[in-house]
């Protein structure tokens, strides 16, 4: 089929719009100049500097701990929610599980902040509150992916397991879980990427003592957009991209792509 | 003796009565079929026997034990699903071994029993394959082997041949009969295909609107249907509105303008009673109007159309009063594709002991 030149041109324009800013960040992270304005020469010194920056390393550690724990918790809870949504066909359940996804982040952030402060006091804001907050908004994503995985399956497979002598727990362990594993892993990766680059909700729930990578970048940018920020952003981009590609390969039916 | 007893079982879904006060018994070693159109309650009944659903009223008793407190996984009853429901992430061998593993058998027993089960369905060379690598017929055989491997008391089969093409279906029917004979397990088969039910079963329960219309052996069901529904559902049948003229050793029926015919006596028939007279097309003989000697139950008509099927031809004959009747003629003479043409004047007749008078 012949494509109209207008269609091709507009597609190119949209892709440029999407990716040029990202490309600029990557390119200037290798720029041998303290000011980002013009290209001077190639260097990897900003990455080296980044690795020696204690503040940055602490933020990175925080972000990783939050993302791993929140993703793990969200995966367990989200998988359970996904199975429940599939099995009970309730109208209310998807609504309850998926609302945090649809909610404006700022709203979720503020309400979580108010919840933590009024319930546990101002000093309760910590790594733990961030983890809880991230888990909250990640559950829905995991649940959607797991449910999508289950939706395509022949229901009688699970009945067959029971029929042939498996207890409900054995059915879950030997049949359901192996069949939804790709969805569960994809959901976990998705939760991890969502957590590691979250700014808004983290901003409200982290308090003063818990810098994360996005928070640190924001603080640095307030002063000036240094090449160090570019380098950090590039690394974060690379990590996120890798995880999304992997998740897409594992469960293409749940995360767009083929199928 | 009675192995499975269904006692006054009723199951409702909202206002819809799926199974309505059904009772029957299944004997040990029997090939028993629940036959009926979709929505007749046969699958609901099967699911209750398997333990996926519970009756609202009544009880299901296996070997003298009420199953109401026994969950599906503890019933010695296995199911072969219409979709086969093989575990896609397990090999053929692992699929067949599954019920043995659940029963806690030791590894050596599992291995040898699984191998024997696969040999029985001639799939011993396919043990390492995954379900998606198998043909429909092979999947079917894996499902059968898996259902039978630890010798359940009952094997339930939910339209298992529905997904197969006609040729393969016939072959699987023969295999099913052989398998059932070999293992001696009681089969409860659910289908809407009447020919399949007739070919396979020892006994058939014909269901309609949640009730059993008739429970009988295939030949009796076909030859002596007790209700209009059974006559219509099983095989082809001519159905003529009739009124009882007189009763006695034979029944005399008034067929509107056609006049009176003789039919087999029916218990409880009263003069003046309205109903239908049913007769199978193969019981109706057809000959040229000219060379027919006068006989009882003989009517003149014109060939309206015919269906040549190969082994037989079905003639559709318009009788003088507007009734239309089908007659079957075997094409057993070589080279003779058909005997009559559209518009030919013919006489149709049938024996006084053929057919039956049924309540409307």
Image (cartoon, coloured by chain):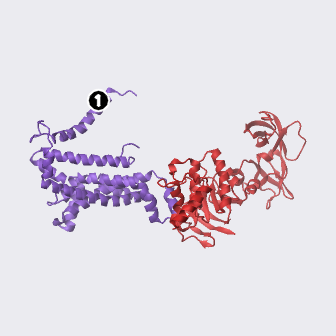
Circle 1 Cα neighbour tier, 10 Å, few/some/many (<14 / 14–19 / ≥20): few
Camera-side residue of A92 and A174: A174
Q: Residue furthest right?
A: B293
A230 horizontally vs B297: left or right: left
* Drawing shade for chain B: red
User: Residue B22's quadrant in the figure?
Assistant: bottom right
x, y percent for residue A194: 27, 52
x, y percent for residue B187: 64, 60
Quadrant of the drawing holding the C terminus of chain A: top left
A156 horizontally vs B260: left or right: left
B271 horizontally vs B163: left or right: right
Q: Is residue A194 visible?
A: yes
Q: Is residue B103 above or below residue A228?
A: below
Camera-side residue of B8 and B177: B177
Name the residue at 9% across, 48% down: A223
Instruction: Tell me the purple chain.
Output: A
x, y percent for residue B267: 80, 61
Q: Which residue is mark 1?
A: A9
Task: Kindly state the secondary structure of the residue where label 1 is placed.
Answer: helix
Q: Is residue A96 visible?
A: no
Q: Is residue B349 above or below residue A92?
A: above
x, y percent for residue A20: 22, 37
Name the residue at 14% across, 60% down: A208
Quadrant of the drawing holding the N terminus of chain A: top left
Camera-side residue of A171 and A222: A171
Camera-side residue of B209 and B167: B167
User: Residue B15's quadrant in the figure?
Assistant: bottom right
Q: Chain of mark 1?
A: A
Number of numbered callouts drawn: 1
Name the residue at 77% across, 54% down: B223
């Amino acid at each position: 089929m012949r494509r109209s030149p207008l269609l091709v041109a507009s597609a190119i324009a949209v892709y440029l719009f999407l990716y040029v800013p990202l490309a600029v960040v990557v390119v200037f992270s290798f720029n041998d100049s303290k000011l980002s304005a013009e290209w001077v020469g190639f260097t990897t010194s900003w990455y080296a500097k980044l690795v020696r920056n204690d503040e940055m390393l602490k933020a990175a550690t925080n972000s990783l701990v939050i993302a791993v724990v929140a993703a793990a918790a969200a995966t367990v809870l989200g998988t359970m929610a996904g199975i429940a949504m599939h099995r009970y066909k309730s109208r209310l359940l998807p609504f309850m599980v998926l609302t945090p996804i649809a909610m404006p982040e700022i709203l979720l952030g503020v309400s979580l902040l108010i919840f933590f402060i009024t319930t546990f006091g101002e000093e309760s804001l910590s790594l733990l509150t961030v983890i809880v907050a991230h888990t909250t908004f990640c559950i829905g994503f995991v649940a959607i992916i797991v449910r999508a995985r289950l939706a395509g399956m022949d229901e009688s497979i699970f009945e067959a397991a029971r029929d042939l002598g498996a207890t409900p727990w054995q059915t879950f362990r030997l049949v359901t879980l192996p069949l939804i594993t790709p969805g569960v892993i994809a959901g976990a990766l998705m939760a991890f990427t969502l957590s590691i680059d979250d700014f808004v909700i983290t901003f409200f729930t982290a308090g003063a003592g818990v810098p994360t990578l996005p928070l640190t970048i924001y603080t640095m940018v307030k002063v000036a957009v240094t090449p160090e920020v570019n380098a950090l952003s590039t690394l974060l981009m690379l990590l996120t991209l890798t995880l999304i590609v992997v998740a897409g390969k594992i469960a293409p039916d749940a995360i767009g792509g083929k199928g | 003796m009675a192995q499975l007893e269904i006692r006054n079982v009723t199951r409702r879904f909202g206002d819809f009565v799926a199974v309505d006060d059904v009772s029957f018994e299944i004997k040990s070693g029997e090939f028993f079929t629940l036959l009926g159109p979709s929505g007749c309650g046969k699958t609901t009944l099967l699911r209750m026997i398997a333990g996926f659903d519970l009756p609202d009223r009544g009880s299901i008793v296996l070997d003298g034990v009420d199953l109401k407190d026994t969950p599906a996984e503890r019933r010695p009853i296995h199911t072969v699903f219409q979709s086969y429901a093989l575990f896609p992430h397990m090999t053929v061998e692992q699929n067949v071994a599954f019920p043995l593993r659940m029963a806690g058998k030791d590894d050596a027993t599992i291995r040898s029993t699984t191998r024997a089960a696969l040999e029985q369905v001639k799939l011993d060379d396919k043990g390492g394959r995954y379900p998606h690598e198998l043909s429909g017929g092979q999947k079917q055989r894996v499902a059968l082997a898996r259902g039978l491997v630890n010798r359940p008391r009952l094997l339930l089969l939910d339209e298992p041949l529905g997904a197969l093409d006609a040729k393969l279906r016939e072959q699987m029917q023969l295999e099913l009969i052989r398998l059932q004979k070999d293992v001696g397990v009681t089969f409860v088969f659910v289908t809407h295909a009447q020919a399949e039910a007739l070919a396979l079963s020892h006994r058939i329960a014909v269901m309609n609107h949640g009730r059993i219309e008739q429970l009988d052996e295939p030949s009796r069901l076909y030859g002596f249907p007790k209700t209009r529904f059974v006559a219509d559902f099983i095989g082809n049948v001519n159905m003529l509105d009739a009124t009882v003229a007189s009763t006695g050793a034979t029944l005399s029926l008034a067929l509107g303008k056609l006049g009176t015919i003789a039919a087999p006596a029916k218990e409880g028939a009263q003069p003046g009673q309205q109903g239908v007279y049913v007769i199978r097309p193969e019981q109706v003989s057809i000959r040229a109007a000219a060379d027919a000697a006068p006989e009882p139950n003989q009517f003149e008509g014109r060939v309206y159309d015919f269906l040549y099927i190969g082994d037989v031809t079905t003639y559709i004959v318009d009788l003088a009063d507007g009734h239309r009747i089908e007659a079957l003629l075997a094409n057993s003479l070589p080279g003779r594709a058909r005997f009559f043409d559209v518009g030919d004047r013919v006489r149709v007749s049938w024996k006084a002991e053929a057919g039956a008078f049924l309540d409307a």
